[in-house]
Each structure stands twice: as structure tokens, then as C-alpha cells.
Image (spheres, coloured by chain):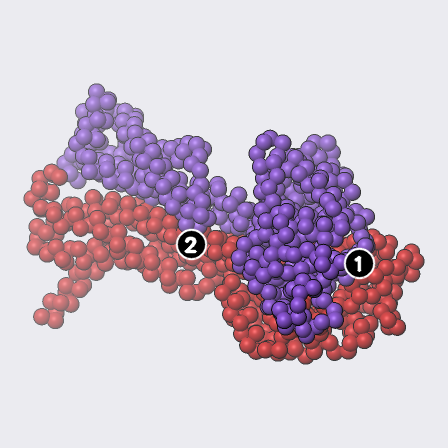
Chain colours: A red, B purple
Amino acid sequence: MTSSRATNKVMFWRIIRRLLGANRGRLFVMLLALGAGAAVTAALLNLQVDAKRRLTTEFRAFGPNVLILPKGSSFSGTGTLPESTILSVPRNVGNAHVATASSLFVIATVSSAQSGRSLSAVVVGASPRLVGWISSQSALSLPKGRPMIPAEPICMVGGRIGKQVHAEQGSRLNLTSGDQKETCLAAGLAETGGPEDDRIEIDLRAAQRLADLPGRISTIELIVPGTPGEIQNYIADLQRLLPDVDVRPVRQFTEGEAKIYNRISGLLTATVAIVLLLTGLCVMAAMTNVAMERKMDVGLMKAIGGSMRRVLRLFLAEAALLGLAGGIIGGAAGIFLSIGLGKAVFGVAARPRLIVYPVAVALTVFVAILSAFPLRRLASIRPASVFRGEA
Amino acid sequence: MFLRIVADSFGRRPRHKLLTGAALALGMGVVTAVLSVSLDVGDRLAKEFRSLGANLVVTPQADSLPLEIGGVDFRPVNAGAYLPEADLPKLKTIFWHNNIVGFAPILEDRATVFVNPPSANLNSLRSYDILHPAEPPTVSTVGTWAQHKFSLSDGSSFATGIDKINPWWQVQGRWFSEGLRECLVGQALARRMGFHIGDHIYLGGSGPRVVLQSSLPQFLVTGLLSTGGAEDDAIILPLDVAQHLSERPGQYRKLYVSALTKPEDAFAKRDPKSFTPTEYDRWFCTPYISSIAFQIQQELPGTDVRVIRKVAEGEGQILTRVRMLLWLVTGAALLAAVLAVGASSAASVIERRTEIGLMKALGAGSGTVGFLLAAEQLLLAFVGGGVGYSLGIVLARLLGQKIFGAAPEPSLIVFLVVIALAAGVTVLGSALPLRRASQYEPAPILRGE
């Protein structure tokens, strides 16, 4: 009994080997179809996971999306917070880093030593600068011909205020508020279209000296990465953690982003689903082809007494093997493909996600077995009519 | 005879033809859907990005520097310059007027606010007035447009306003109507001072004017506004009423414009002064944000039109990437569809080896056989492609409706592409097995080997 089962097993694998080896061309076409399917699947799945993550990073180009303000502040800028508040802000959302910056607003008289002009302007003490969208501008350029670490503090001068005081790169500006006085060298001078155009940005310490408010800040700006849901949770957690302050999302960006993110991710999911469907179709067509060619084999097997179940099992095993091979080769190719695609789209190679690989292989095997469905038609084959050359 | 063979082939094995045709139709349907959605998606997404608010801001050239902290301007009331409201309809006459989604002028001021008319008897005073009897609180006021309609030179009318360009502003209640003494109160302000929808409040100008208390205008609170920004602490009024209150008839100070633009490329970032005449025309006739800003500046003299870089650049960057990503995905979908259709048409030719053998045995040349089969496949391709196209349009409508809430328009280009693709793919897919078939010796095939 055991020996007959063992013989059966040996015979089973032998037939499978023969089935696979019988037609090299066909084997190649099948592997190509399955492999291509697996490659496209793996590439798209990987890219989709990565693209969503990248999108949330891209959204950070809009700058801060969460503000921490003194409680009950009527946005008049008069209330202040202790500087130490920033220490209790959690720095991570998932694996991503939350960028923070504290700033203090002071209204001061600005005068330029060169042009002799002076006017009142808002001076912002910031620490550190939030490097977001502004890094693409020339705003961080230092005055020409000066050492990298200048002897005097540098201030970023907004485009419009720069024009009005006739400041140039490197001109010296005097800032006075009450009887406090600071000097700095002008840099930046780019127009951004935002409130920065009308402001001068200096070091936080200098602004605190200017306002005579040591250790105080007006607001903390946060750049919180992540999906809209993650940002909402972060805000709720932060408010619970810091009950003495107001935590507000910058709704202009958080809401707009949520809308756009949902659209884009819906679009990506829909397209990926469609491509998967097509891949299945492709493999199914190839398998139908196989079923047609196998009539003679099946007729013969049935004629010498093979039961339909055993014959079907043979073909299913063949399909699964093909799916496995195609999935392993194609999945690997697809992940490499997605790295290249990620580089083309986002300028940064997509990080390969190992989970995608087994998923792609499993999907391919599943599709291969499912598309062996046309083989069911072989069940109705009558050996005699096949051998007579009919049907 | 040729037609008879083709007709016979369809008539004799309708199920087989149906199967191949179905695969073809399904594949082409997907191609149609993906192509229609992709062609449409750029414009749709660009519109979505307008929910981020204005990307252009217009200010008077002669303006003094605003002393703005957290959305409140600390300038003296008389400082700075103003712009005439009457010029605004000109915005819809610029070359890219169709790309201007909306605009809203802003007139900011400060006003004193009373819950009850100062002459009312003491019993009806709200707690705030009792606690702070000496100085009536000063609040920020914002005069602007909401659902403001004006007619254009071509006879149509255009509605715009702050509600259109700042869709994240949520109003509980309703917007004010223009020309009436109605207002919205910021949520935080309303909570602090105990205002409710339907209340009447009294506003007095903040200027050095002496106002007779009994002549203070009465305003109906029509809604509470929540913006997450400085407006939560302000009172929003119709622009004409605000102008009256600030004694600035027909004037505004700041204009926000929301425009659909093409993401800036290297060409658009160059200085327009360095362009040759042809380059200048190309720049002028492309909806880059810089060329729209330039055209607005030409229409509204004495203004400074600035691009809000934060919004414009972030938008441009993301839009470019998403578009590229979608084209790549579309490419993948097309490739998969082509593979599927090619494989199924290859299968349908392989099936007919015996038939080919018979034809050759009867003296048909390889060319004739190939031509015959190609004709059959093409017929199938046209029918399958056509059915697939209509299927795909339905699918595209579903997808478009689901994702963007609006269905893409069926386009002729997509139809032509789909039919051409169907024909090309089926012929190519059958070419390979046909070439092999032409090498068959009839005898072994007929023997069944």
C-alpha cells in the first residue's frame, strides 16, 4: 500500500515534469504571462504604498500645518508661552519626525544704516527656521563675500520690507523697540507672497532681548507628517498633553490636503485594482490556450484509467508551479521596476517593502490556479471522440 | 468564397468567437476607462487644489508696510493705500479669465462692538456690558464678498466671494446678504461675548470720529464662522457695509485671487523681460501663475500682484508628480491589457491548426491563410473594441463619479486610440502563431499529430 502510494507520487511528479518540459515555447509564454503579471502587480503595489507615503511628505511643502498658541489668545499676538513648552511636544508620528519651531513676534523700528530710512515692522524671532518650501527659494543665501560664520547676526528680510528700507544683501539694519537695540546683516530678500514679505526674521534670543521677554515665545509651529487621520490624532493627543495651550490645525492646508489625498489615493487604488484584473485576464487567456492543447493528453490519461480528479490535480499542480515560478521571478523584477519608477516620479527611489513580495507571489499563484478554471472543460472530454480526431 | 469562409467561421463556432471577443471587449473597456480618467484627471486635480485657497494676492503699490501679527493689522487706520472696487470686474476680461476660479476683496478695520444699544435700559444688558462698562470692546472687522454676483460683458453672470476661494471656512447658519446690515461672527469671538445666531449687535467705527450713540447701526448675526485662523476672532461684514463703516466708500485693501494654473517649469521661472517675442507670446498664452499675475497687474493699475509661493509651488510640485505617476500607472494598465488581448487572440489561432492544415492541403498559400485569419481577427477587433469602448465609458463614469464626483466626458480620441489598439494588438497577437502555422506541413496536422 505504502509502496504503491510512493510509486503514485513518483509518477505524479514525473508526469508534471513531462508536462512542463513537453513544449518549451509554451512554457516560456506561460512564464512570461505570469511573470509579467507578477511584475506589474509587485511594482504597482510597492509604488502605491510608497506613493501614498511620499504624497504626505510632499504636502509638507506647504509649511507648518499645526500651531500652538497661548490659551484664549485672540490672535492678537499679545499673549506669550514659556519657551519650555516645546520640550513637551512629542517629536514622532509613527516613524516620521515632527519639525518644530518657536517664534516670538515684536513690533520694532527698523532702520538701515546705509540708506538712512526707517519704519515700523514686525520682527520675528525664530528658532530654528522651519525648512519647508522656503528652502527652494534663495532665501537662505548668505551675503556675498562674507565669511560663512559672520561676526554679526544675520536676519532674513522679507521682499517688500527690503524694498521699502532699501536694504541689500549684507547691509546693516538697526532694530529698536523701547530702549532695546539689536543690529544685524540683511540676507534673503526674496518675495514669497506670504506674511514673510513684510517681516524681518532674527534669532529667537535676539528677539527676546528686543522685546524684553526672556524665555517667552508667541507661538510654536509644527510640521506634522502623515495621513490626514494621523495628523488629527496627533492634534488631539497634543491638546490632551498640553491643556494650558491652544492647539490649532492650519485648516487651509489640513482640510485641503485631506481632500486631495483621498482623491489621489482612491485613484491609485482603482488603477491598481484594474491592472490586477487585467493581469488575471491575461493569465486566464494563456491557460485556455493550454486546455485546448491538452485534449489529447487528457484523452489518453482517461483511456488508460486515470480518474478525472487525478487528472485535474495534475493540471492544478502544474498551474500552481507555474504561478510560483512566475511570481518569484516577476515579483523580484517588479520590485526593482518600482524602485526605478519611484525615482522617476518622486526623485527618490521607492523603498522596497518586503511584504509586497510574498503578497505578489501569493496573488500570482492564486490567479494561476483560478485561471486553470477553463481546464474544467476537459472533464467532459470523451477519450474515444478525441482519438477519432473529432471535437 | 472569402466572405463565406469568414462568415462560416463565425457561425460555426459562436461560443469560441464570443469568448475571444469578450476578452477583447473587457481589455479594451479597461483601456478606455483608464485613458478617459487619465486624460481628465489633470484638470480635476488642479481644481481640487484650489481648495487650498488663493494663490495670488493683490495689494496697492503705494501701500505702507502692514504690521500684521497673527492676522491682526496693527497699523493706524489712516495709514496705507486703498484700491477701487469698481475695477474688479475687469479681472474677468483678462486673457485667462476662464482660469480665474474666484476672487474676493478684503477691507479690514477695527470697530467697537455693543451687544445692546448703548441707550437701552440697564436691566437688559448682557453680562459683558456689565463687567466692562467703561470701554466697549474693539474687534477686527473684515469686509468682503460672499456669493457676490456681477454680470460679465458677454451677458453671463459670475458669482464669487470669500466662500468660494476659502472652502475650509465653515459657516453655521448662513452667509450675510449683500447690502443688508447682516454679519457673521467668528466662533471664538461669539463664545467670548455670548453672541448667537439671530442676535442683533451694534458696531461703531474705530476712527477718531465722534459717533452719536443712538445712530449706531444695528447688525443681524446670520451665522457663526469657524476658520481655524484669525477670522475666528473677527466680525465678517458685506464689503459695501464695511466701506460705509470705515468711511472708505468703493475701496478695498487686499484682493485674493484663486486661479487654475499650469505648474511652473524651467521656462516659466525665467525673467519675462529676457524673452524673445515668440517666447513672450508662448509665456503669455500659457496659464502659468506668473503670466496670470502679469495680466492682472495690467488690468488693475497701481497694484502689486504677488504669487503666494507657498500655495503655488506646493501645488505645482504635487500636481506634476501625481500626473506623472498616473501616466506610469496608465502605461502599466495598457501593457497588461495588450498582453491579455494578445494572448487570447494567439490562443484562438492555435486552436485552428487543423483548419489551417486542411486549407493548405487544399492548395491555399500561406499568404491567403494569413490574410483570411487576419480579416477574421480584425472584424473581431472592431466589434470587440466598439463594445469595449462603450463598456469602458460606463466604467470611466463610475470611477470618475466615485473619485471626483464628476464623470469624464467621452472623447473621440480615446475611441480612435482604442479601436486602433484593438486592431493592432489582435493582429500582432495572432501574427506569431500564424507565422508558425505557415510552417506547418499539412499532413501531420491532419493525421492529428
For disc 2, the chain is: A
- In front here: B431 or B394? B394
Q: Position of residue A281 (x, y in %)?
A: 31, 47
Question: Which residue, given by chain and number where applicable, does mark 1 sit on?
Answer: B210
Which amino acid, by three-letter code, is at mark 1?
Answer: Val
Q: Position of residue A135 (x, y in %)?
A: 69, 59
Q: Is residue B349 left or right of residue B313?
A: left
Q: Position of residue B120 (x, y in %)?
A: 66, 65
Q: Is residue A285 left or right of residue B326?
A: left
- In front here: A262 or B358? A262
Residue in the image at 26% along x and 56% along y:
A369
Q: Is B33 situated above or below B312? A: above
Question: Which residue, given by chain and number where applicable, does mark 2 sit on?
Answer: A269
Residue in the image at 35% along x and 47% along y:
A278
- In front here: B383 or A295? B383
Residue in the image at 13% along x and 67% along y:
A5
For disc 1, the chain is: B
Image quadrant holding the N terminus of chain B, namely top left
Q: Is residue A334 visible?
A: no
Q: Position of residue B276 (x, y in %)?
A: 74, 34
Which amino acid, by three-letter code, is at mark 2?
Answer: Thr
